């Protein structure tokens, strides 16, 4: 998730667009998922405060499934997840041996932290931090081995902010995995076909026709910005 304003909590409507009626009531749901031999207990806190950040979206499940089916190696890797929402992707990466930083806007961190505590055993390497794209990415190092994101490409106004954040965070030999529902009305195709390839070697790693979810893998095309 991203916000172009210095105070991302001030106007969450601009960051978390809501589907009418979807988050009318405040309630929590607990779900169980199994990936890579791990049972993940994820709590989703639905309500107007978190909006779309509350739920586990199809793209996150597709990305977790991809990691499982392709035996993606997280052991000893420095990993960051962007726009984590529930944190399910970053949690799986931590359980698979990654040194993981799970990020989103400040108002989402409580939900992520609760899910981390419920799934990552003591001693597991998973920290939760606030990150607003285009604003404070430079307080994070620029040498991550893996940068992850699931269903974070849906607001065209945030695309330049996301692109700049990806360019900073991904190390010179790092890899980005982005899973996205290819919603035409949200400009996802434009981001992946025109913006991202300007700076990254991009390949379509997997396509799920039933869910309309693409998983892309990207690596730096040339020298990163200073």
Image (spheres, helix red, strand yellow):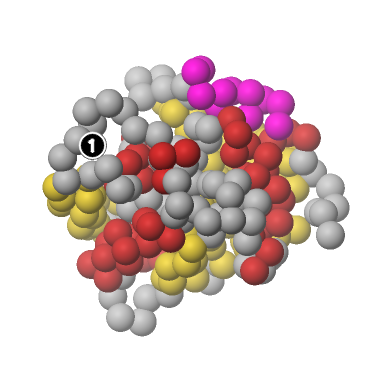
Residue 210 visible at all: yes
* Residue located 49% across and 18% down the image: 185
Residue 98 seen from this side: no
Q: Which residue is mark 1?
A: 23
Residue 164 placement, left or right of 129: right
Total label count? 1
| Percent x, y of residue 100 | 48, 66
Compared across the picture, whether 19 is left or right of 209 comes to: left
Q: Which residues are magenta?
A: 184-195
In front of the other: 25 or 164: 25
The answer to which quarter of the image holds residue 173 is bottom right
- The residue positioned 63% from the left and 67% from the top of the image is 140
In the image, residue 65 sits, relative to residue 79, either above or below, namely: above
- Residue 109 image offset from top left, x and y in percent: 37, 62
Q: Viewer-proximal residue, 143 or 138? A: 138
Name the quadrant of the C terminus: bottom right
Q: Quadrant of residue 12?
A: top left
- Is residue 165 inside the magenta stretch? no
């Amino acid at each position: 998730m991203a916000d172009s304003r210095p105070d991302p909590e001030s106007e969450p409507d601009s960051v978390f667009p809501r589907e009418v009626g979807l988050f009318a009531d405040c309630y929590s749901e607990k779900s169980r998922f199994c990936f890579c031999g791990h049972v993940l207990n994820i709590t989703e806190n639905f309500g107007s405060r978190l909006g779309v950040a509350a739920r586990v979206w199809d793209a996150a499940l597709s990305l977790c499934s991809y990691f499982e089916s392709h035996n993606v190696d997280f052991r000893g890797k420095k990993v960051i997840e962007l726009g984590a929402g529930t944190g399910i992707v970053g949690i799986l990466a931590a359980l698979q041996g990654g040194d993981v930083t799970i990020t989103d806007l400040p108002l989402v961190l409580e939900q992520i932290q609760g899910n981390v505590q419920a799934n990552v055993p003591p001693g597991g390497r998973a920290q939760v931090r606030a990150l607003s794209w285009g604003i404070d990415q430079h307080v994070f190092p620029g040498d991550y081995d893996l940068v992850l994101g699931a269903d974070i490409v849906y607001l065209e106004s945030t695309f330049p902010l996301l692109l700049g954040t990806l360019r900073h965070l991904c190390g010179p030999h790092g890899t980005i995995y982005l899973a996205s529902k290819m919603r035409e009305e949200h400009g996802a195709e434009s981001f992946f076909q025109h913006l991202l390839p300007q700076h990254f070697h991009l390949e379509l790693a997997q396509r799920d026709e039933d869910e309309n979810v693409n998983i892309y893998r990207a690596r730096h095309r040339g020298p990163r910005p200073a």
